[in-house]
Amino acid sequence: MDDRLFTLNKKIIDTVYDIICFLYKDKDYPRFFVLETVARVPYFAYLSVLHLRETFGDRSGGERMRTHYAEADNELHHLLIMESLGGNDSAVDRALAQSMAFGYYWYVILVYLLSEQAAYHLSELIEDHAFNTYDGFLKKNEEKLKTLPVPDIARKYYEEDNPFLFDLFCTVPEADDEGQFSKRRPKLNSLYDVFVNVRNDEREHWKTLCNLVQYEDMQGPPGGVVGKVEGTAPDEEARLLREAEGGGGIDFKNPFD
């Protein structure tokens, strides 16, 4: 991907993210509501373009369409969880989120038509911010969150619904210490567990997007090597990502080496 596109994408996403964090500095659930409303938009945009291409005879995007639908469904449930926590109570917050989502949808469609890698990179940056945002929230509020109940919508999605779509968006499986691959089956005892799973979901999206940007393939190269476009992840982030998978490490590389 052209370095200029990478730089432009990073400036756009970092600016929007910083503005949202400034406006919602002490309002976590409304901030998460706005972020989730915007974060799910690219998957709609990807699907719109892929459906259009399919209409005109291009059947090559079928696997991506299925995965992007599952990703959109996952982000929808994140949004429903934030709404159940009161994140959308304010009409001002709803209007802001919807306005940003509307404009961003058309922007991503334009970018996707011009460069799929650039469009996927936009979402890679968003998901990276999302992972770190939720991880920071968990660290700051662990004790309180462990005393709060699980929202009904979270229990339904993570424990009761058919896991087909949930498994579908996890495109980069990782082996445990014994070399076995297993599906995530979250167990929820408190609101803390809910946010742990939301955070880990964002990581799954991030891995898929990294591979689409660097290799134009959702699974990536043999061995499941995943790395940021801008280079090697810091040690702390690598540790967090290992923890998110229950101890199974992930290899990072600099794609420009």
Image (spheres, rainbow, N blue to C red):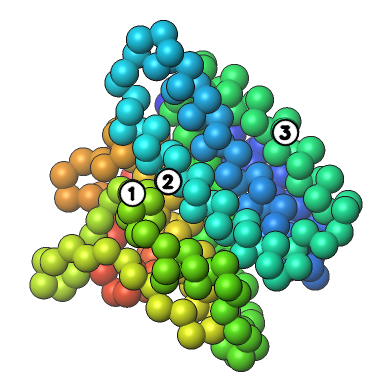
Question: Quick one: 153 or 97, which is closer to the camera?
Answer: 153
Location of the C terminus by quadrant is top left
Direction from residue 221 to residue 132 in the image, left or right: right
Q: Earlier in the sequence, mark 2 or mark 1?
A: 2
Q: Mark 2 touching mark 3, by CB under 8 A? A: no
> Whole-percent x and y of residue 105?
64, 31
Residue drawn at (39%, 17%) of the image: 54
Q: Establish if 26 lies above or below 116.
A: below
Residue 146 falls in image quadrant: bottom right
Q: Residue furthest top?
A: 56
What label does residue 70 carry, if any? 2
Q: Amino acid at mark 2?
A: Ala
SS assignment at label 3: helix
Residue drawn at (48%, 16%) of the image: 52
Residue that numbered label 1 is attached to: 168
Q: Amino acid at mark 3?
A: Phe
Residue drawn at (57%, 79%) of the image: 150
What label does residue 215 carry, if any? none
Q: Amino acid at mark 1?
A: Leu
Residue drawn at (44%, 23%) of the image: 50
What label does residue 102 carry, if any? 3
> Whole-percent x and y of residue 130?
57, 57
Q: Earlier in the sequence, mark 1 or mark 3?
A: 3
Q: CA distance from mark 1 to mark 3?
A: 27 Å
SS assignment at label 2: helix
